[in-house]
Amino acid sequence: MSKGILDHPGEDNQASVNLVGRVVLFAGILLGTVNFGVDFGLSVLNVSPNLMRQAALGAFLFLTWLAVSSGLRAVDKLQPGIAVGWLFITGMGIGLWGQVVFALARWAKAVVREEGISFAFFLLPGLLPSLAVSLLVAVLTAITLRVESKLLATLLRILIFGLIVLFIYLWL
């Protein structure tokens, strides 16, 4: 039988699923609520819409990096040697769950104000960016945690950022 990306040599697979689920649940709720708090705080301040959008984007990127990186490090620390696939699942799960909690909080605020907007209106626009950023952070953190050589880890990070810059350049 071949070794898969989710196979963990030490523990049974159920322990990995339980650990990943708990970390995703906790970190995602924390990410979504703090992101909503920042969004609500920025909306209370009377600043220009351009500045508010830039500050919200910066806070989103920083908070996503913090939550996903911390979640992956917690999973790796609690279950050393866990398969890399579980690290990617953890990172994507934190980003997905954080976006769901954030959208749910924004939807609840709209319901309280009796605006009558659907939940999908708040969820769908931020879903793909949230998953993309959380996957990028998960890959970079997995490189940090698993690649022994610092030189090779640095080269891999430079390669990833170079490909992203090339993709953005060709897209625009």
Image: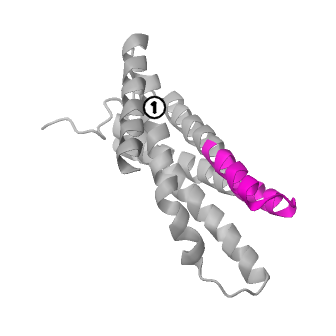
Locate residue 37 relative to residue 83 in the image: left or right.
Answer: right
Residue in front for this viewpoint, 77 or 138? 138
Residue 118 is situated, as x and y percent measured from the top left of the image, at 59, 82
User: Is 112 rendered above or below residue 150?
Assistant: below
Residue 156 is situated, as x and y percent measured from the top left of the image, at 37, 24
How has the structure been colored for display? one colour
Residue in front for this viewpoint, 141 or 89? 141
Q: Which residue corresponds to mark 1?
A: 140
The part of the image, by quadrant, that contains residue 159 is top left
| Main secondary structure found in the magenta portion | helix
Q: Is residue 74 magenta?
A: no
Q: Residue at x 53, y 28 (%)?
A: 77
Q: Residue at x 56, y 45 (%)?
A: 23
Q: Residue furthest left?
A: 1
Q: Is residue 18 among the parts visible in the rendering?
A: no
Q: Is residue 2 among the parts visible in the rendering?
A: yes
Residue in front for this viewpoint, 7 or 15? 7
The amino acid type, in three-letter code, at marker 1 is: Leu
The part of the image, by quadrant, that contains residue 86 is top left
Q: Is residue 54 magenta?
A: yes
Residue 111 is situated, as x and y percent measured from the top left of the image, at 73, 82
User: Is 25 rendered above or below residue 152?
Assistant: below
Q: Residues within 10 Å of mark 1 (few under 14, many from 20)?
A: some
Q: Element at badge 1?
A: helix
First to last magenta residue range: 34-61
